[in-house]
Amino acid sequence: MWSSNVAIQGELSIAGITASDLAQEFATPAFIMDEVDFRARATAWDRALQSAFGQNAGTVYYAAKAFICTEVARWISDVGIGIDVCSGGELAVALAGGIDPGKIEFHGNNKSVDEIQRAVSIGVGTIVIDSLIEIERIGAAATKSGKVQRVLLRLTPGIQAHTHESIATAHEDVKFGFSIASGAAWKAIEEVRKHASIDLRGFHAHIGSQILDTDSFEISAERLIAFLAKYRDTFDSQLAELDLGGGYGIHYLPGDEELIPSVVMAALAITVSTNCARYNLEIPKISIEPGRAIVGPSMFTLYEVGTVKDVTLENGDNRRYISIDGGMSENIRPALYAAEYTAILANRTSIAPLLSSRLVGKHCETGDILIRDIALASDIAPGDLLATPATGAYGRSMASNYNHVPRPPVIAVNNGKARVIVRRESEADLLGLDI
């Protein structure tokens, strides 16, 4: 839930810097990111993949959609893993951060002609195909560039992963990929094979996000391997790669489980080897796409309390509303799909009794609720600091300017030092696009 460098003894501190000092220097709200923790988690997933699959280990692709900026792209390059992007903007940031194009995997269910042409021309390592139309676009772009583009087909294995409907991506009625059951996946194979400028390397599946057991990943792997066998039997040739996606769950609340890299990879290695032996297949190169599992716990959001209001409910109970200086503009997930978070008093220790509270934002929406029900100290007052852990994934990346609120900065901390890696937006930024 917290990064490994967070200490809570009287006052929250990270990498030796107190919450009060961070608020004083950088103001609030602010995303606080632990560089050491991010690098360690990225390395842990890479080592787990290499340990489990050995010579059959492919690439760990960091899922940029969770959070990306040029500095984080530099860290990814330093660690030596790849990156998965799903738009021209994410591609631009990855390149600006110095990531080798050959270690970039390009996703997306509606890649534009321009995005595909750019990806092919700069030498993106792999494009994950999501529709028949993309096959034609990639073939044309590769022919124009005089290249043979490596691709994977994104398949829908028909799995109802145990997660929220909005972040489940592998059942049949979904916008992503080609359904195996309907025959769409086989039709895509036939179309790809018509293009000499496309090199079909294998298959990809992503079953959802914030999944806290390995069962769904194992079932997905089984179905992809069965499809590999069908391809081998039909064309007398085995495809070389499988990308098993990401979606590994993390701690958000006290008591939550978290998927451990070594445990997940060991389970997948058994599944892959067992099923490849069943179909007499060679074990393909196995790649994965953790995003949230790397950046989620590496970041927290620091807020200042603005107002405190007591409300009497219809049943006579009381609830305290604690308003902070951010809200749904920098964390839309609670409003979007009922994501749950916790929070702590960050600038001091309180021995006051706990009180049923609701943590809300400053936006003009009844649904601007970060935490619907939480027990917080009854003496919390304006000026206090609150910290919400595990906001690294999809906080800043999904942030908006709703109510024309400037988006917060991202502050990287490392060994007692803090620096801005994404600056705070200003009112000038908000006005800068107006004509």
Image (spheres, rainbow, N blue to C red):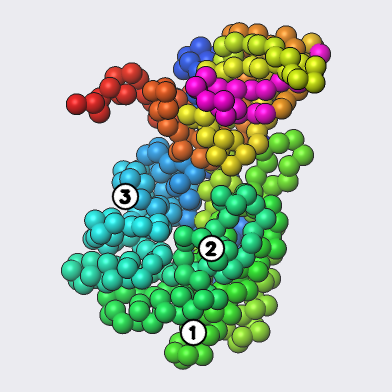
Distance CA(mark 1)–CA(mark 3): 32 Å
Callout 2 secondary element = loop
Q: Residue at x 59, y 35 (%)?
A: 334
Q: Which mark is residue 231?
A: 1
Name the amino acid type tagged 2.
Asp
Say if residue 299 shows up in the picture.
no
Amino acid at dot 1: Tyr
The disc label shown at residue 141, or none: none
Q: Nearer the viewer, residue 121 or 74?
A: 121
- Which mark lies nearer to you, 1 or 2? 2
Within 10 Å of the Cα at label 3, are there few (<14), some (14-19), or many (20+) other Cα atoms? some
Q: Is residue 39 above or below residue 21?
A: below
| Type of amino acid under label 3 | Gly
Q: Which mark is residue 88?
A: 3
**At 35% across and 54% down in the image, what residue appears?**
100
**How far is mark 2 from mark 3, CA to CA?**
27 Å
Q: Any mark on residue 173, and which? A: 2
Q: Which numbered disc, 1 or 2, marks the residue that appears first in the sequence?
A: 2
Quarter of the image where the C terminus is located: top left
Q: Please state the horizontal and vertical placement of residue 201, each as a whole percent of the image.
A: 42, 74
Q: Is residue 267 visible in this depiction of the protein?
A: yes
Determine whether label 1 and label 2 are within 8 Å by CB: no
The region drawn magenta spans 353-372
In the picture as drawn, the residue positioned furthest to the front comes out as: 314
Q: Is residue 15 magenta?
A: no
User: Label 1's element?
Assistant: helix
Where residue 263 appears, as percent x and y from the top left, is 70, 57
